[in-house]
Image: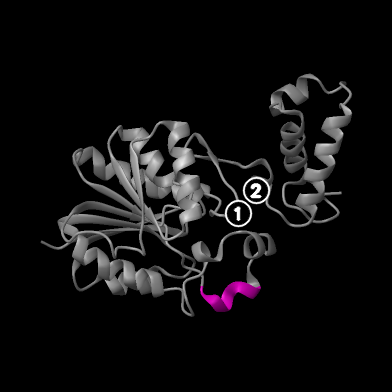
Amino acid sequence: MLEQSAVPAARLTAEVLLAHATHRDRAWLYAHGEDELTERAWIHYGRYLNERLSGKPTQYITHVQEFYGRAFYVNRDVLIPRPETEHLVEAALQFLKAHPNARVLDVGTGSGAIAISVACETAQNVLASDLSQAALAIAERNRRTHNARVAFFAADLLDAVEAASIDLLLSNPPYVPGADAANMQQEVRDWEPHLALFAGDTGFEIYRRLIAGATRVLRPGGRLIMELGYRSLEGVRDMLSPKWSDIKVIADLADLPRVITAALSK
């Protein structure tokens, strides 16, 4: 059924949903391949398959997405964390090795995956913000699960942040141009929160506000680390050129520019 509906990774999806329906892991399924499903499990499995066939992402059915070695609760209020965003976490950890007492802020935290990963890997305090109260509720749930030292607050980008108060600013901002909506995967466009996806007509609107705000809230020499959208590298680099130095670009496993880092000139 999943293959006929062109669902990506159909076999894996079938196994993940079956594991969710039986409250077991995939290893257990392989070890008990001859077992009969209970009526309750069949009912749940049928519902999950129908939801997936309707386009609902697997992660919103199971409410789980792995990120940086940890399981995060997700629902339609938050963007599903992508493996590519782990490059941003790696860049943050590299900076914090040299600046262990840095004050860190993750803007547009969503599920809290970035902030919580950084906090858990470094055992230090992290600040994180989002415009969505619903997203902050999910982030707080994940914080409790992982016992992370993260403090969340509601804000529109950097409007509520004091000047020259941050050493490391992290963000995976919305960067999809509104005109690209028609070309997006249907399950992304129809299910994931548009607030976390779309950034105006050009896709640079949030980058522009974020970089302008970063020049105010970062201390001199502070570091800005952002995820890059498709074809956004040159535009973002141009925005950074007047007041920023030590600009570096990190490619993902597909060799696409994924993360940009820059230091606020002293």
Q: Main secondary structure of the magenta part?
A: helix
What is the CA distance from the residue labelled 2 to the residue labelled 1? 7 Å
- Tell me the SS state at disc 2: helix
Could you tell me which residue is drawn at 78 percent across and 40 percent down? 14
Q: Is residue 245 visible?
A: no
Residue lying farthest to the left in this orientation? 266
Q: Is residue 174 above or below residue 239?
A: above
Q: Which amino acid does label 2 sit on?
A: Tyr
**Lower sequence index among marks 2 and 1:** 2
Q: Is residue 147 above or below residue 102?
A: above
Could you tell me which residue is drawn at 50 percent across and 62 percent down? 196
Q: Does the magenta stretch include residue 180?
A: yes
- Tell me the SS state at disc 1: loop
Could you tell me which residue is drawn at 21 percent across and 66 percent down? 215
Residue 111 coordinates in the image, percent (x, y): 48, 48
- Residue 144 circle label: none
Q: Is residue 98 above or below residue 257?
A: above
- Residue 60 circle label: 2
Q: Is residue 122 magenta?
A: no
Q: Identify residue for label 1.
A: 76
11 left or right, relative to 154: right
User: Dividing the image into 4 quarters, which one contains the C terminus?
Assistant: bottom left
Characterize the local packing of mark 2: few (<14), some (14-19) or many (20 or more) Cα atoms within 10 angstroms. Answer: many
Figure quadrant of residue 32:
top right
- The answer to whether mark 2 and mark 1 are in CB contact below 8 A is yes
Characterize the local packing of mark 1: few (<14), some (14-19) or many (20 or more) Cα atoms within 10 angstroms. Answer: some
Q: Is residue 132 visible?
A: yes
113 left or right, relative to 155: right
